[in-house]
Amino acid sequence: AAASTALTDYLEALLAEKQTHPEDDLLSDLATRQVVTGQLSRRDAARTGVLLLAAGHETTANMIELGTLALLRN
């Protein structure tokens, strides 16, 4: 729980930075299109970032695992 809170806090601070200095990335889009307009709070946008990070990591790790398994079988 502490690690999740720390990651959410980090992303919340990063979203604040992206709000004032947007770049061409997903967090900047969240900050400028969702947070600024009031559709999401900065905390909720940070939680969305945590979910996206976890989802991206999990799918990549699974594909590496499946690729390794395929190589070992052949």
Image (tube, helix red, strand yellow):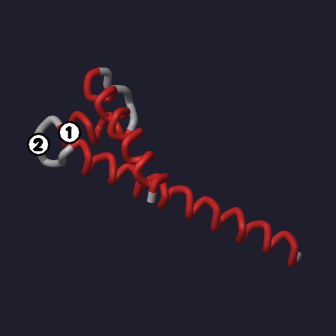
Task: Give residue 33's mark.
Answer: 1
Marked residue nearer the N-terminal end (1 or 2): 1
Residues 58 and 42: in front is 42
Mark 1 closeness class: few <14, some 14–19, many ≥20 residues within 10 Å: some
Residue shown at the point (38%, 30%) measured from the top left? 24
- Residue at mark 2: 38
Would residue 41 appear left or right of 29 to someone viewing this image? Answer: left
Nearer to us: label 1 or label 2:
2
Q: Quadrant of the C terminus?
A: bottom right
Residue shown at the point (33%, 26%) measured from the top left? 17
Would residue 33 appear left or right of 73 to someone viewing this image? Answer: left
Residue 64 x, y percent position in the rendering: 70, 62
Name the amino acid type tagged 2.
Answer: Gly
In this view, the residue farthest toward the bottom is 73
Residue 8 x, y percent position in the rendering: 38, 47
Q: In this view, does 17 lie above or below 68?
A: above
Name the amino acid type tagged 1.
Answer: Arg
- Residue 42, quarter of the rendered image: top left
